[in-house]
Amino acid sequence: MTSAYTSDHISNKAHRLNHRSEFSEDRDRKNYVKEAFLHTWSGYKKYAWGKDSLKPMTSSSSAGFGNWCATLVDILTSLWLMNLKDEFKESVDAIKKIDFTVSDETINCLKLPFVTWEVLVDKLFLAFETPSGYHVTEFIIGKGPIPGLANVALAAIRSCQLEFSRLTQITKDKNYEEKAMATGNFKSLKRFNTLVRAGENELKYFIRINRSGQEENIVDHLALFMGGLLQYEDFVLNTKDSSNLGLKITETGYQFIRSTSTHLAPDSIYINDIGPLVPESKTNYLRPESRWDIFKTFKKYSITPSGFAESENTQSTDIKDNQLDYMESFWLAEALKYLYLIYSDDSF
């Protein structure tokens, strides 16, 4: 499949949206997001099929995650939600032929039990056969644990508990939940990750958060999920205690893009009481965003002939010199999927 998608594809049509109904506007925006997805999918399929990720500047591939088809695994829900059923089947057929690591398989595959249940999940039990009950960090199916890797992220533990518990609900087999929940007391853990980095994913499985340690006036883009999490807390607990703070955090996220010349969000910013926000890390990694104008900014600064590229310096408008030859799988698995859902109607 050859993509005819260009950096002007959105801008040439965007002015029409102002003269249409809200429903038509959202439908068109959803289709434009899908076109961006298909443009990237086309590049991945042509230049990086079966590899972890696409290198969008050189139209080549990267095996940075152990060469286990990380992009294919990560984007299954995106393919399904966008009604790309042929591409979904093609990806599943390829995934059946590869090996996985435990935490990534659970996070990205087990959420699709109708795909992975018969193929993979029972084989994961061997990873929990450890003195502590925590699963080994890296476990290659058919080969066993990778020696020397003893750390386990809270995100991996909580994800296993969530997905294995759901699998018990579906299958009525208590073994899945019991195996994962046996690791839940954390008594043998000596160090915890914080709100960002690996700890960011773990907090998606908590409603309440215990915050400790030294305060630092830097906010990572990864931490902005807290805005939605706090609003979700009020929804789940039927309270009104956290939504206002959640909205303010979300607004802070929008201020990220206003702190740069390109209006691409830096990966972290300094927070102070008296002046504007200042980028701390100027790189943009194509992380999820929620606004149409930000999507158009991606189109302006990030698109390449085979995909979308990360930007080294969000303060520079020199597109060619700033584009990096890397594209994380979450561009397809999260950023474009979330935008697609935002512009889908309630009957979707």
Image (cartoon, helix red, strand yellow):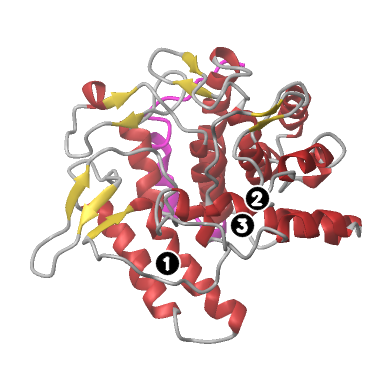
Label 3 sits on residue:
158
Please state which of residues 229 and 30 is positioned toward the viewer in this rendering: 229
Verify CB contact (< 8 Å) between mark 3 and mark 1: no
> Viewer-proximal residue, 230 or 169?
169
Label 1 neighbour load within 10 Å: few <14, some 14-19, many 20+: many
Circle 1: element type: helix
Q: Is residue 177 above or below residue 309?
A: below
- Describe the element under mark 2 as helix, strand or loop: loop
What is the three-letter code of the residue carrying label 3?
A: Arg
Amino acid type, residue under disc 2 in the picture:
Tyr
Classify 10 Å Cα crowding around label 2: few (below 14), some (14-19), many (20 and above). many
**What's the mark number on residue 134?**
2
Locate residue 332, reporting x and y percent: 54, 37
Q: Residue at x 65, y 52 (%)?
A: 132
Magenta segment, which residues? 1-23
Q: Is residue 47 above or below residue 261?
A: above
Quarter-of-image position of residue 196: bottom left
Which residue is denoted by mark 1 in the rendering? Answer: 227
Q: Give residue 105's position: percent from left, percent from top.
A: 67, 39
User: Mark 2 vs mark 1: which is more N-terminal?
Assistant: 2
Q: Find residue 308 and report its image quarter.
A: top left
Q: Secondary structure under badge 3?
A: helix
* Image point (58%, 78%), residue name: 235
User: Tag 1 or tag 3, which sits nearer the N-term?
Assistant: 3
Of badges 3 and 2, nearer the viewer stands 2
Residue sitting at x 42%, y 36%: 10
Instruction: Tell which circle, 3 or 2, labels the residue nearer the N-terminal end.
Output: 2
Expressed as whole percent of the image width and height from the top left, the position of residue 109 reads 70, 41
